[in-house]
Image: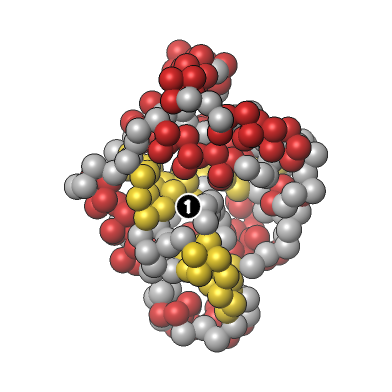
Amino acid sequence: MPLRIESEDRLRNIVISLAYLLKNFDTNVIIEEVDEDSKFQQYAAPQLENLIDDMSSVTLLYEKSKDPIFHRTRILNDMLMESKTDVVVNYDTDVIFPISSYNIAYNMILKEGYDLVYPYGQGHYQEKVTVNQKLINSLINSDFSENAFVNHPDTENSTSDYGWAQFFNRQSYIDGGMENENFISYGYEDNERPERFKKLGYKVGRVDQAIYHMEHVRTMNSWFTNPHIENNKQLYNDLKVKEPSELKEYYNNIEYMVKRLSHGKK
């Protein structure tokens, strides 16, 4: 989970999503927070400790930085290299899914040979959730059951394509080029990723169930106002026309791949 807590609703969402994961699954969570100070330690951790009996499965990586740009792809690769499990998940702090979606996606990779699985459908599967006190009370009273989201009246149905969360076979993820660190901040990396893995011959699938997206304030790191957007767009356009052999050569020789595979980290 790449993290920068830029607003009160982002803080609220990381607490909700992390509590939901830890209440419902026996899993390991790696969080990498990049900010001037660790707002997770200051504000999120105390709230979570009141909700979760054991936080030992959560690993926090903290990088002090005054850079206003949140380099999400680099941060995801940091955590990928730290991970030890056969299945890894890029996980947005603002989403949850039905419990069955996680299990189906996990088994698609371990038992059916998928390399990349999106745990939500493409089309009208996104439920944009307005989080209010009624939902928070329902979550706490239900011990973070998915029914609190299913039965929440303040949602708006919208289309879903790519982003939010992806389940990967860890080795396939690395072999396929990881996250392209030349995509900086927000924009087009979510489009490039599935196209790349399909073109390189990896098995890509979906779970045709809902995604619950908790709404939040949009900053430049989560919208098209970031200063890298045009470069990101140009990079995407350049990559999507490459033949599979050209794409493989590009990713085999890109600087961050050479460095990470040589040294094991950034």
Q: Residue at x 40, y 30 (%)?
A: 200
Give above or below for 52 relative to 2: below
Q: Nearer the viewer, residue 104 or 34?
A: 104
Callout 1 secondary element: strand
Q: Residue at x 43, y 20 (%)?
A: 245
Query: Residue 51's spot in the image, x, y percent?
Result: 47, 68
Give above or below for 76 relative to 101: above
Residue 241 sits in quarter: top right
Give above or below for 215 relative to 170: below
Q: Quadrant of the C terminus?
A: top right
Q: Residue furthest left?
A: 111
Residue 121 sits in quarter: bottom left
The color scheme shown is secondary structure
Dot 1 corresponds to which residue?
165
Query: Residue 219's spot in the image, x, y percent?
Result: 76, 54
Q: Amino acid at mark 1?
A: Ala
- Total marks shown come to 1
Q: Nearer the viewer, residue 251 or 237?
A: 237
Q: Residue at x 44, y 49 (%)?
A: 166
Query: Residue 161's spot in the image, x, y percent?
Result: 52, 56
Q: Nearer the viewer, residue 46 or 239?
A: 239
Q: Is residue 20 visible?
A: no
Name the side, left or right, on which 234 lies relative to 162. right
Residue 183 sits in quarter: top right
Name the side, left or right, on which 233 lies relative to 136. right
